[in-house]
Amino acid sequence: MISGLWKKDWLIALLLTVLVIVLARGQGFLSKLERVAYDVGVSQTHRSTKATDNVAIVAIDEPSIKQIGRWPWSRGVLARMMRKLAHARSKAVGLQIILSEPQTDLGLKYIHDLTRYVNKTRYPRAARGEIRTIQRKLRSAEYALNVDSQLARALLVRHNVFMPMVFKIGSPLGDP
C-alpha cells in the first residue's frame, strides 16, 4: 500500500509544496528562484535572434526641430511620418509620445460653422455650381485643419504601431 502511495500525483504535489515552503524560509529563496527561471526563459527565447542594422530611430532632437519646426509637432506632421513609414513598409513603429488631449485648430470650428450654414441654406439653381465648389473647398480646409483625424486615419492603415498608455492608479470607476 505504501509503494502505491508514492505513485499518487497529489502526494508528489504535497511533497513539492512542503519542500518549497521549507526552502522559502531561507532568505530570498523565492526571489532567487524567480530570477533564475526568468534568466533561463529569456536565454531560451532569444537564443537564435541576432541584432540587425536596419533599425531607424526618428528622434526629436535639435536637427529635427530645425528641419521640421518647433516642438510639439502637429499631429499632421506625425500623420505624414506614419504614411511615409507605411510606404517604406516598416515592420514596427514605436510612437513614444503621449497624445492625451485633442489637438484642435481654432479655424476648424469656423469651418464647421460655415459648412453647416452653406449646407442648410437654400440657393437658386444658378448658384449651385458655385456652392458645390465652396463645399469642396470647405471639406478640403476641414481635412487640412483636422490633424487628429489625419493621424487617426494614418494609424488605421498600419497595424504595427505601438503607442504608450497612461495608467492612473486610483479608485475603480463603476461598480467593482
Image (tube, grey):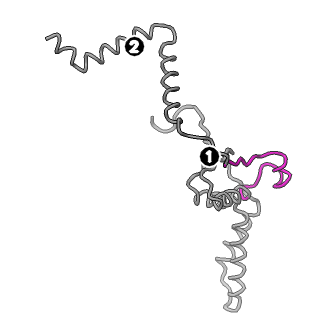
Residue 71 vs residue 93, the one in the foreground: 93
Q: How far apart are marks 2 and 1 (CA)?
A: 40 Å
Quadrant location, the N terminus: top left
Helix, strand or loop at label 1? It is loop
Left or right: residue 115 versus residue 160 is: right
Relative image position of residue 47 (x, y in whole percent): 53, 35
- First in sequence: mark 2 vs mark 1: 2
Residue at x 25%, y 16% (from the top left corner): 11
Q: Is residue 142 above or below residue 28?
A: below
> Badge 1 is on which residue?
163
| Residue 129, picture quadrant | bottom right
| Residue sticking out furthest to the right | 66
Image height check: is 124 above or below 158?
A: below
Residue drawn at x 69%, y 67% is: 143
Query: Going 66% across and 91% down the picture, which residue do you hit?
Result: 125
Q: Quadrant of the C terminus?
A: top left
Q: Where is residue 87 in the image (x, y as percent from the top left)?
A: 65, 62
Q: What stretch is highlighted in magenta?
A: 54-76
* Dot 1 amino acid type: Met
Q: Which amino acid does label 2 sit on?
A: Val
**What type of secondary structure mainly makes up the magenta span?**
loop
Residue 134: give x, y in percent of width and height: 72, 79
* Residue 66 colored in magenta in the image: yes
On the image, numbered disc 2 is attached to which residue? 20
Observer-nearest residue: 65 or 165?
A: 65
State yes or no: discs 2 and 1 in contact (Cβ < 8 Å).
Answer: no
Label annotation for residue 148: none
Q: Residues within 10 Å of mark 1 (few under 14, many from 20)?
A: few
